[in-house]
Amino acid sequence: MLSIEGLRVEVEGKEILKGLDLEVNAGEVHAIMGPNGSGKSTLAHVLAGREGYQISGGKLRYLGLDLQELEIEERAHAGIFLAMQYPVELPGVNNMIFLREALNAIRRARGEPEIDALGFMKQVRDKARELNLDEKLLKRSVNAGFSGGEKKRNEVLQMAMLAPKLAILDETDSGLDIDALRIVADGVNLLRSPERALILVTHYQRLLDYIQPDRVHVLAAGRIVRSGGRELALELEEKGYGWLSEEAAA
Amino acid sequence: MASPDAGVDRLIQAEYQQGFVTDIESDTLPPGLDEDVIRAISLRKQEPDWMLQKRLEAYRRWLLMSEPQWASLHHPPIDFQAISYFSSPKKGEGPKSLDEVDPELLATYEKLGIPLDEQKALAGVAVDAVFDSVSVATTFRQTLAEAGVIFCAMSEAVREYPELIQRYLGSVVPPQDNFFAALNGAVFSDGTFVYVPKGVRCPMELSTYFRINEANTGQFERTLIVAEEGSQVSYLEGCTAPMRDENQLHAAVVELVALDDATIKYSTVQNWYPGDSQGRGGIYNFVTKRGDCRGARSRISWTQVETGSAITWKYPSCILRGRDSVGEFYSVALTKGRQQADTGTKMIHIGENTRSTIVSKGISAMEGSNAYRGLVRIAGKAENARNHTQCDSLLIGDRCAAHTFPYIEVKNPTAQVEHEATTSKVSEDQLFYCRQRGLSQEDAVSMIINGFCKEVFKELPMEFAVEAQKLLAVSLEGAVG
Amino acid sequence: MNHSLLDASAEAERYIGGLDSRAGDWLAERRRSAVLGIQQLGLPDRRQERWRYSGIDGLLDGNFSADWESTDNPLPPLESVMPDGTQAGLLVFVDGSFQAELSFVNDTGIQFTSLRAAMAKGDRKVLAALGSLSGTGRHAFSAINLATMQDGAVISVSPGKSIDQPIELLHIATAAAGGRMLRPRHLITLDKGSQASIVERHLCLDADGYFNNVVSEILLQEDARLDHQRVQLEGSQAYHLSEVHVQLGARANYRAINAAVGARWSRTEINGGFLAAGANLDLEGLYLAGDGQLVDFHLDVVHGVSGCSSRSNFKGIVYGQGRAVFDGRILVERQAQQSDAHLTNANLMLSRGSEVDTKPQLEILADDVKCSHGTTVGQLDPQAVFYLRSRGLSPSQARRLLCLGFASEILEGFGNVSLRGQLADHIQRRVESIDLENV
Ligand SMILES: Nc1ncnc2c1ncn2[C@@H]1O[C@H](COP(=O)(O)OP(=O)(O)O)[C@@H](O)[C@H]1O
Ligand SMILES: [Mg+2]
C-alpha cells in the first residue's frame, strides 16, 4: 500500500530524514518509535504533503500513485489521514460543519453522493458517543479552547468519520490519561480491517498494550535503525533509545 | 505547490454578479446642484412647502461646509456639479399595485433575487424596492397595515404622514451634522419610512432593496424608523449597482428612534459595485446612520456586512439616552482590489446603566484597505455604563492594510470599558489542517474566513445569514490563492 | 498664533553669537532652521489629532520665558534629594544646567561631556548627532528646544562594555526656575554590544510654576542593551514636556519604564524605531493624575524593518479633577514582515470629576505579523474592596492596597529599589488621602 524508499527530507537547509525506507501493506499496523526530534512528525507531515519540507531524494508510492504529485487534499481524497500531534484551532468554524464539508469533499472526489444532513448527524453523534466525546464539543469551533485530550479525541472522531485507507496517528496517545487512551485505542481498533493500514507514531510502548502492532520500527537520526515485532517495543521500554542511536552512529 | 495566498487570490477575483444595467426609460434631471434643482425635486415629489423649506435650509448649510478629511481614505475630488440628483423610471413612481409596475423593473429585481411578487417572495419578508431616486414597489403593505405598521416610501410618507415626519425627520441626524448629511437633507429623493406603533411586534422582516441603475446619478436616500413604546422591528437593507467606469455617489441618511422598551434591529448587506481590480469605477458610499435610544430599556442593534463600494465611509451609531438602553454594532467589512473602507461606530452613553457591544471584523485582501474607527464616550452622568469592543483584522496578502482607531472617553468612574484589537492572517497551519481533511484551498480559506466572521453573521436575521456567507464567499473568489 | 514662546529667534541668535562661537556655522545652521520650524509648526491646538485631548491654555498663560540662562546664584541645599553615590555616574542638572561639582563618572566604559561643553568646544561628532533622531520636531516645543538648547548630557558607552551600576541623570528645579522654560537636551549612544542602565529623575525643590521642556535622543547600536528608568516628580505647579526618540540597531534592546506622577500638566512622547532585525522595544508606564493634574502619554512605535518586536504596557490611576490621556500608536510598514507588536493600557478611575481619554491605534501594512492592543477603563473591583473591608480595613486603606496592587506590575520593573519604594510611597500616600466625599 505504502512504499517509502530512500527518503531524504530537508527543513530550512537542514537534513532531517536521511534515507528512510518503509513498507506498509494493507491490513497492517505499524508503530514508529524514536527519541524526540528524530523526525517522526516530519515523516508524518511529508506523507500528508505539508509545505515547507524539501524532498531531496527517494520515492514515495501509495496505492500505485506517486505521492509527490498529489496536492494535500488530493492525498486526503485518496484516503490518507493524519491525526496531528498538535491539532490546529479554527476559531468560529463549527466542528460538525467542518467535518461534514470534509466528508462531502472526499465523497465528491470519489464520485460518491454527498451524505444528507440527518444521516450525517446521526452518524457523528453515534461515533462521538463511542469515543466518549462530549456532544457539546461538536457544536463548538474546531479544537478552539479544547483541552489537549479533547483535541486528540476529536482527531480520532474525524478519523472514524472519514474512514481513511491509511491513517497516520502522530503521538495521538501523548497527554491522554489511561481512560482516554483506551477510548482512542478502541477507535483505532474499530478501524482495523484488511483493506486499511495504520501507522502509529508513539513515544511510549503503553499504547501498544491496547493496539497490537504487526511491526515496530525505531526512527533515529533520520533513518529506521531497527525493525521488529512487538517485543522490540518492550525492549525499548526497558533500555531506552540510547543504545540504538549509538548503534546507528557506529 | 500552491502558497496559501495563491488560493486566496483565486477566490478574490470573482466577477461582480449584479453588474448588469436595466434598459429602461427614465426621467433624469440634468447634472448640477442649485436651489432650482432642489425645488424641482420637491415639485416632482409633490411635497408640501415645509418639506421644501427643510431642504433649502439643509442646502444652505451644506454650502458652508467642506468635505471631511480625517478618514484614511483617498479619492480624487468629487465634482458635485457633475452629478444628477434625481432619476426615476418613467413609469416608476408610486404605483398603486404591482400590476402597474414596469415589467422590466420586476424582472430586474427578480434577477437580483428579490421577487416583488408576493406569491414568490421570501416568506415573512416585506420589501420596499428603491430604483435610482424612487421607490418602485412596496410589498405586503396590507398584511403590515393590519398590524398597524406603516411601511412605505419616504416620499409617500411626507405626503401621508406629515405629523410623524415633521416630528422625527432630522431629529436624530440634523442637517448640520456633517457634510454628506447636509447634502442628503437637501436632495434626498426617496427611501423608506417605518412606524411601529406602541406594543406592536412587527409581524415580518422589513427590507429595502436599493438599486442604482442610471449613469452619472447619485443616490441619496433617507430612511426613518420609529419604534414606539414596547414595539419591535427588524429591518434589512441590500444594495447593488451596475458596473460602470465612473464613480457614483451614494450619500444616505438613516435615522432610528426607539422609545421606552422598543427594539430596532437594523441589518445591512452592502454590495454596491466595488470597482474593478485597478480601482476603476465603483460606488462612493458615504452614509450617516444613527439610532437614538430615547426611551428607557430601548435597544438598537446595527449589523452590517460590507463587501461592496469603492469607498465606504460610515459609522452607524447609538445615542444611549434612555436608562438601561442598549446599543450594539456588529460589522464585517471586506476590502479587496483597491477598495477602501473606513467604518465603525459611535456609542454615546448618556443614561444610567447603558450598555454597548461592538464587534468589528475587517478583512483586507489584495490592495484593499480597511479601517475601524470608533468612539465610545461615557458621559459624566452615565452611571454604571458598560462597553465591550472587539476589533479583529484579517490580512490576506502583503499589499493590503488594516487600521484600528478607537477613541475612548470616560467621564464617569463607575463605567467599565474594554477594548481589544488583534490582527492575524489565515495561517498555513490552518490551511494545511483543512486540506488534510480533504477541503480544497478555496473552501478552506472561505471556511476559515466565515469562521472569523461568525460572531457577526449570527446577528443577521436567519433568512439573510446564509446570503451573507455566500456573498462573502463570492466576493472573496479570486482573492485567495 | 502669537506667543512669547514662539519668539525664540532672539534667544537662538544669542547662543549663535555666544555659547557656540567655536562650533561655527554648522550649529548656527541647525538653530536657525529650528527657528524656522517653530514658525512653521506653530503652537499645537486641539484641532490637531495629537493634541485633541490635551489643551495647552495653562501652559501659554504661564508666559514662561525662553531668554534665560542659569545665574550664578548659590544653589540651595540639595542633600535631601541626592542619591547615595553608588552609581556608575551621577549627572546633576539644576534648573537645566549641568553641575560639574555635584556630578561624577566612575566607570571608564562611560564617556561623558555636558552639551554646553561640547558646543563650546565645537565637538563635531556631537554636533552632527544633535537632532538626527528627533528632526526639527513635530510641534513648536520640540523645535524650541533645538533652537535654544543650552545644556544636557552627552553620554556614550564604549563597545562591548557592560556598566553594572546605573547612571543617574538627576534634574532638580529650584526656586530660580519659577516663570522659566528649562530645556535640557540629552544625547545617549550605546555602542555595539554594550549594556547600561540609566535612571532619569525630574524633581522639584520649592519652585513655583516653570516649564521643563526636555528632549532625549537615544541610539542603541547592534546588540546594545539599555534599561531606562524615568521618574517625573515635578512640582505641583510645573509643566513638563518630555520627548524621547529612540532608534535600535540589530538585536538591540531598549526597555523604558516611565512613571509620571508630578506636575500640573505633563506630556511624554516616546518615538521608537528600528534600524535592523532582531531588536526589541519594551515600554512600560505608570501614571497618577488627581488634583487637577493632566497626565498625557503619546507613544509612536514604528516597525519599519522586519523581524522586530515591541511591547508597551501603561497603567494609570485618576481621581479628583485629574485627567489622563493615552495615545499609543503602532505602525507596521509594508516591508516589516514578522513584526510582533503589542500594546495595553489600563486605567483605574477612583472618583467623580476625573476623566480618561485613551486612544490606542494600529496601522498595519504587512500581513505576516502579530499585533494587538487592548485598553480598559474601570473602577476598583467592589468585590475586592468588600473583601478587604470584611478583614477590617477602612475604605481608604482598602483603596490604597488595591491601587498599589494595580501599580505593582509596573513598579516591579524598577530595578532601582529606592526609586521603587519612593514611588510606591508617593502613590499610597496620595490615593489614601483622597476625600471621596468632596472631590
Ligand atoms: N519547520 C521547521 N523548521 C526548522 N526545523 C524543524 C521544523 N520542523 C522540524 N524541525 C526540526 O526537525 C527535527 C525533527 O523534528 P520532528 O519531526 O518534529 O521530530 P519528532 O516528531 O520525532 O519529535 C527537529 O530537530 C526539529 O527541530
Ligand atoms: Mg513529533
Image (tube, coloured by chain):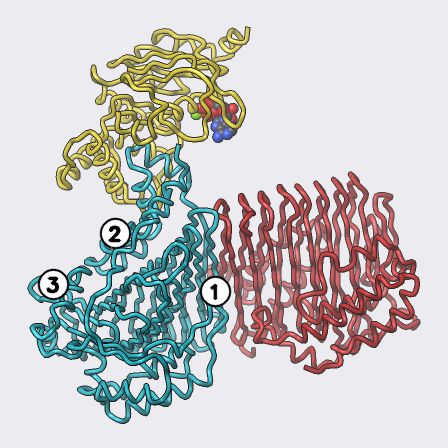
Chain colours: A yellow, B cyan, C red
Front disc: 2 or 1 = 1
- Work out which quarter of the rendered image holds the N terminus of chain B and state it: top left
> Which amino acid type is marked by label 1?
His
Residue B199 visible to an observer of this rendering: no
Q: Are marks 2 and 1 on the same chain?
A: yes
Check disc 1: other Cα within 10 Å, few if <14, some if 14-19, many if 20+.
few
Relative to A132, residue C8 above or below: below
Residue C157: horizontal and vertical position, in percent?
80, 46
Labels 2 and 1 touching (C-beta < 8 A): no
Work out how far the residue at label 3 is from the one at label 1, CA to CA, in angstroms. 40 Å
**Label 3: which residue?**
B121
**Nearer-N-terminus badge (3/1):** 1
State the residue at coordinates (73%, 53%).
C218
Q: Chain of mark 3?
A: B
Residue matched to label 1:
B74
Relative horizontal placement of residue B361, taking residue C215 as reference (left or right): left
Rendering quarter of residue C127 = bottom right
The foreground one among B179 and B95 is: B95
Residue at 65% over, 59% down: C270
Q: Quadrant of ligand 2?
A: top left
Q: Which residue is mark 2?
A: B470
Seen at 44% across and 68% down, the residue is B376
